Image (cartoon, rainbow, N blue to C red):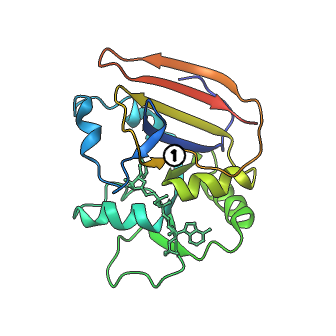
Amino acid sequence: VAQVAAPRVQIYSASSVDGYLAPPDGSLEWLEVVDDAADFGFDDFYSHVGTAICGRTTFDQVTGFGRWPYDNTPVVVLTTHEPPADYPANVTFDDGSDLTALTQRLRETAGERNVWLLGGAKVHQQFLAAGLVDEIWTHVLPILLGDGIRLLPPPYDRRPVRLIESRTYENGAVMGRYSLT
Ligand SMILES: NC(=O)c1ccc[n+]([C@@H]2O[C@H](COP(=O)([O-])OP(=O)(O)OC[C@H]3O[C@@H](n4cnc5c(N)ncnc54)[C@H](OP(=O)(O)O)[C@@H]3O)[C@@H](O)[C@H]2O)c1
């Protein structure tokens, strides 16, 4: 993995060839188009994550599966609603009223590591529009969904980005890592 000075604010996601991160109902079965065992270097990426930001929809979906996979990482969940009665120890909630201040605080928390924008699409859009994203890692999986939730929905400004790393996988997935800053 190319080394770039941390902390970097990073989108790291899977999408369809037609640019969706989920079908219209938000379900996850489509990810099975690639072998479950394919981890796309996630463990290495995650070992460089100091803290993460997650939208309430994605948080509710993941916790709904009964197991929170990010116990060792402080995760801030953006929400305008009350937290659930029970939630993982390392999770905090933020009303999202000042994403720039939140990002600055999390950069300091992350220290030598990075800030992962865990998703979903609404989080991607707001951080892009606010100019707070340093990197986008897209893993394009070999499937057309035809419709769904866009990976990087508008609006945000047009801008060139720089490819800093790419990988292809035998299962047909392609990873592109782009720097925005
Ligand atoms: N393919 C991938 O790699 C990947 C990764 C992550 C997620 N996903 C998918 O993405 C889908 C969910 O994405 P989504 O765009 O619908 O939802 P999302 O971004 O996960 O969550 C959106 C919710 O987060 C809260 N929120 C977001 N920004 C906020 C802000 N600035 N201030 C306060 N609250 C804020 C709001 O909840 P309140 O209603 O509480 O205000 C909002 O409705 C799921 O289907 C999930 O599976 C895919």
Q: Residue at 45% across / 56% down in the picture? A: 73
Q: Residue at 53% across / 23% down in the picture? A: 1
Q: Tell whether 83 sits left or right of 160.
A: left
Question: Residue 126: in sight, yes or no?
Answer: yes
Q: Residue furthest front?
A: 146
Location of residue 178 in the rendering, given as x and y in whole percent from the top left corner? 63, 29
Location of residue 32 in the rendering, given as x and y in whole percent from the top left corner? 23, 36
Location of residue 14 in the rendering, given as x and y in whole percent from the top left corner? 42, 38
Residue topped by disc 1: 49
Q: Tell whether 98 sits left or right of 94.
A: right
Q: Tell whether 53 sits left or right of 156.
A: left
Respond yes or no on whether mark 1 lies under 8 Å from ligand 1. no
Residue 169's quadrant in the figure?
Answer: top left
Q: Residue at 65% across / 22% down in the picture? A: 163
Residue 162's quadrant in the figure?
Answer: top right
Residue 158's quadrant in the figure?
Answer: top right
Camera-side residue: 30 or 59? 30
Question: Residue 113: in sight, yes or no?
Answer: no
Q: Residue at 48% across / 54% down in the picture? A: 120
- In this rendering, the answer to whether 159 lies above or below 71 is above
Q: Amino acid at mark 1?
A: Val
Location of residue 129 in the rendering, given as x and y in whole percent from the top left corner? 72, 53
